[in-house]
Image: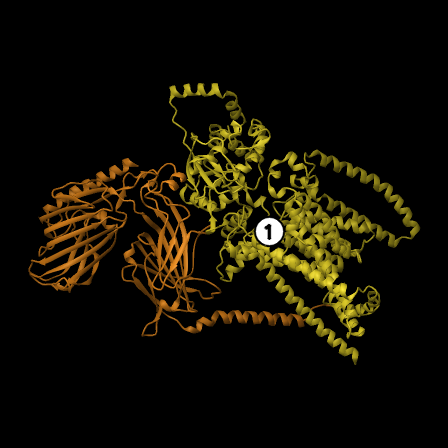
Amino acid sequence: MEGLLRLRLALVFSVVAHLSLLVRSSSLSSPELQIVNAERRIDLTSHIVRVYLTLKVENAGTSPASEILLAFPPTQVDRIALVKAAATVGKKKKKKSHLPLDVNPIALPVAPNGTKHFAISLSNPLGVGESETLEVFYVLTHSLEPFPVEISQSESQLVHYHDSAIILSPYLIKQQITVIKTPSTKVESFTKVELTDRAGTEIKYGPYDERPPYSFSPVIVHFENNNPFAVVEELVREVEISHWGSLQITEHYKLVNAGARHKGIFSRVEYQSRQSLSGVSSFKHLLARLPPRVHSAYYRDDIGNISSSHLRTDSRKSEMEIEPRYPLFGGWKATFVIGYGLPLQDFLFESPDGRRYLNFSFGCPLAETVVDKLTIKVVLPEGSQNPSAVVPFPVEQHLETSYSYLDVIGRTVVVLEKENVVPEHNSPFQVYYNFNPIFMLAEPLMLASAFFLFFVAYVAYLHIDLSIRK
Amino acid sequence: MEATENGKGSTLRYAFGNVLSFFILLLIGILAFSIRLFSVIKYESVIHEFDPYFNYRVTQYLTKNGIYDFWNWFDDRTWYPLGRVIGGTVYPGLTLTAGTLWWILNSLNIPLSVETVCVFTAPIFSANAAWATYLLTKEVKGTGAGLMAAALLAMVPSYISRSVAGSYDNEAVAIFALISTFYLYIKTLNTGSLFYATLNAIAYFYMVCSWGGYTFIINLIPMHVLLCIVTGRYSSRLYIAYAPLVVLGTLLASLVPVVGFNAVMTSEHFASFLVFIIIHVVALVYYIKGILSPKMFKLAVTLVVSVGLVVCCAVIAVLIALVASSPTKGWSGRSLSLLDPTYASKYIPIIASVSEHQPPTWPSYFMDINVLAFLVPAGIIACFLPLSDASSFVVLYIVTSVYFSGVMVRLMLVLAPAACIMSGIALSEAFDVFTRSIKFQLPGVSGNDAVKTDKNEDSVKERPSKKNKKKEKENVEKASIKSQIEKRLLVLPLEASVIAILLLVLLGAFYVVHCVWAAAEAYSAPSIVLTSYSHDGLHVFDDFREAYAWLRHNTEVDDKVASWWDYGYQTTAMANRTVIVDNNTWNNTHIATVGTAMSSPEKAAWEIFNSLDVKYVLVVFGGLVGYSSDDINKFLWMVRIGGGVFPHIKEPDYLRDGQYRIDSQATPTMLNCLMYKLSYYRFVETDGKGFDRVRQTEIGKKYFKLTHFEEVFTTHHWMVRIYKLKPPKNRIRGKAKKSKSKASSTTTSRRSGTRKKNPWH
């Protein structure tokens, strides 16, 4: 296993080295833009890598530019969960405000070494000679590789992080600096290139001047990170709307500790008596942030209720602290289901054109978890029509039909699927649909008529004499 | 004029009585269902205990793969490497019932999970059983007794213990099937209708599908028939009640794969065929008697008897030879241990090791049937006043079931309905007598009125069937006037009757209180999750599921887990891992192999387990929290069962002066066996002394290392510990030779013994 990893590392190194060599020779980017000042802060404190990038872009060309490109190495691009950009409006610090901009992946005809690009669409084109400050925020998942890959119960978890000391960009960067923040001061090693500095929990690369486009300088940081690497491999959230006044949510989790795999024995006596030393990278609590006014919450798995959970509710939020049946060491898995009910009036509204819409939060309620595959199923009441979903980021959508209590025609289910979901995706989405309230009475009427028919049949039976001989 | 008015009034009262008893029955059904929900309310909606997990797993398979796959299911996840043919070795009644329920619900688009359906099957069938009891007792002694018996059965603790929500076991539906079979038998006996006889055969078929206890029916009914014949109560109704049951019932029973040809081959069914022959002979005799003159008849009798005796002797000799040729005399072990209560403990430790196969203690009678135990004799007396075919049947039923319950705790369940029926009859008769006494003596109530009300009550009580009620009513009216005069003489003093009624009500109240307590406290614990109340509130021990969930998610799908057989069903159902032995104890040798491994020293045990492809060993240990039914307490049975097949395991080696102990006085064999080591590995580090809270002693050997096993998981309260077999070491030529010679010099005899006896080498 270790050999394989080394091989992979070597491969990454060679690719990266090639990149840096080749890139210098050919400059393919649009020549008219350049970055005056770039500052990158990489936050490695949890297992989700968050990168804050501040760019000051200047148009040194001859025509106005409406798009600014961000470049990512191909190894990173699959792990990007989210890219957000905002333009800073207002010069002075006090009046500063951020204007969110659209970011979309874009395939350039020629990209050196398979570099992938994202395009930031500016709200108003950048005129010649003008400059603008952009705040870019992106999130990487599965980017911390445990090394060693397997640890025993008493060891703490060390991970690798690969990146470049120089910001990969299609533009010339006049001045740049990169700061990497680690969770603790325990850093095993980090690549030393020119102008590398380490202070406390921060490693600083730069400042570098006048780097040509597509410059790359691979660095590796090897450090201790004992934060829970909680990854939900698959999450299915079912939101069932009942117009009788409640919203029923059922969430099926497949949780795994994606950190360094646990090796050898698990000793309960050590785990219980030496909590600070033993199983530091394991976790046994998870916090689910649920909407306020949650009722009838449950937490169970295939084989029954899991008794270790606490629900705290107040007027603004509900917090459910859940504890899997056993502490999750690296590589250990657990599956469970969380379900709860919510009052309908908090989430279902009527739009001005008479349609109803559900406004609900996308993403996983568990704090600081990555969801590899998230499926949201919004089960609309029977008889609803023309469903459409509005989600602030690209998701896969399709419709299904499900049958629940005494359904005849079935309920329309809007299915939204997204991969690589991080807590930053917890923003509201809407599902619009048409619904005639008369359908609410369908099932009670059906039941009533069934009972009526039964009694009529019984009365009829009592009055029929089928005997042949009197 | 008066007569018509009277008639109108009585019809109204009649209808009122029907509606009233309908609602009472409905309430009894609700009571039977809801008293069993304590386990869901106090704990959760979950399958209980051990066997229900197997039934649940089979039901899941049935609902997923359909009925044909179910019949052909070869289960390779249990009894590794032998496997088990589920379709042919399981009583399918319960599974098919729950599967059908689930299928109906799902086709109505009611999305209940299989688990939910399984959990609530038992309460639903308890309500059905209560209604069946009503019908049965009504046939015997009238509506009043029927309602009383149904109410008593709805909450009898013995039945509750087997049918709380989640207790998804065969008995849950089998008791209903048992009572309905009896009801239909009595109904046929009372009416002589072939329709009911056919229904009876079908009910019997359902019973055969549901539970091995069907042999009780197929022996009890012939006994009753024989009793009727002997006491000169033979009638054509008896013939119709019995002959179709034997023919149809046996044919249907042999359709059930698990019974198959046993329905005609084993001695359990022998009595029914013998009585079948006898009833035909008797029928023939009655027929011939009818067509011949008495003189001719006498002649014929002597002729037939002399010839018949010779033939009978020959047939019986052949039969005895056949039966004697089989080692168990054609009886299964469990049946034999019923006939001879000491049989199991002598020959089959595996049957004796199950606690529910032990004879009950006196308190358990009080616990399980409570005041019914005192009411039963009164009921028996009431059944003799007057004795009818039906009442003689229930008397026979109670007598035999009292005997069987005395042999095995588990069969208390068969006694419970009989006790309820008897007590229902007793209470109803007692109330009848007392209220009549009060009625006759109350001032202001004229005798005429009393006669009228009584008349109506009687007619309600003895209403035989819907079709010919008018004719019957006339008869009853005539008869009741006559009986009124007789009854007037049996009047008790007013004060005595009032006090007696009060006392009876008190007795009933006591019964209800006890039943509710039993349902809520004693019998609702699911046993896979334990709770205890301490000063800081409720404490939950959910260790079993913790361990099973860990196995399910963190081991390979095809890994084999070895544990004592008690946990086999749960491991396959909850952890979905292959087990070596489970609660279907069909292969004694295999269980003995596991028992031997558990009682062997580490190396020998490792070899046995390794030869069985075992990767994980699971032990249950209660020493830390004081959970008393753990493996150390069951260990002597492992030694006994293991020693029964592999004689090098000797029980005295594990006992010090005949005492089982694990403290410093324990024998070295005990302190070195695998079970001891796996249970107490690093236990001393919890409190520094190694104090076992179940045995209330400090353990004998505190510090030791495991050489062939490694701890991979221990649950939060240490109740389940899972060990992994260490992989075999690479063989280094020079060293291996040396160590081998060294080892063989020290423990030659034992090692070679283990080698030889281990069946997998």
Identify the element where label 1 is drawn.
helix
x and y percent of residue B225 in the render? 77, 50
A466, above or below B714, in the image: below
Q: Which chain is yellow?
A: B
As drawn, the residue found furthest toward the bottom would be: B1
Label 1 chain ID: B
- With B122 as the anchor, is B214 left or right in this view? right
> Taking the image as drawn, is residue B349 in sight?
yes
Please identify the quarter of the rendering in which residue A124 is found.
bottom left
B524, above or below B730, in the image: below
As drawn, the residue found furthest toward the right would be: B295
x and y percent of residue B371 in the render? 68, 54
Please identify the quarter of the rendering in which residue B658 is found.
top right
Which colour scheme appears in the figure?
A: by chain
| Residue plotted at (72% across, 51% down) | B397
Please identify the quarter of the rendering in which residue A223 is found.
top left
State which quarter of the image contains the C terminus of chain A. bottom right
Between B602 and A413, the one nearer to me in the picture: B602
| Residue plotted at (24% across, 53% down) | A139
x and y percent of residue B339 in the render? 70, 41
x and y percent of residue B260 in the render? 64, 44
- With B115 as the anchor, is B495 left or right in this view? right
Between A115 and B721, the one nearer to me in the picture: B721
How many labels sit on residues?
A: 1
Look at the image and give the colour of chain A. Answer: orange
* Residue picked out by circle 1: B161
How many neighbours does mark 1 have within 10 angstroms: few (below 14), some (14-19), or many (20 or more)? some
| Residue plotted at (27% across, 60% down) | A393
Amino acid marked by disc 1: Ser
> Taking the image as drawn, is residue A469 in sight?
no
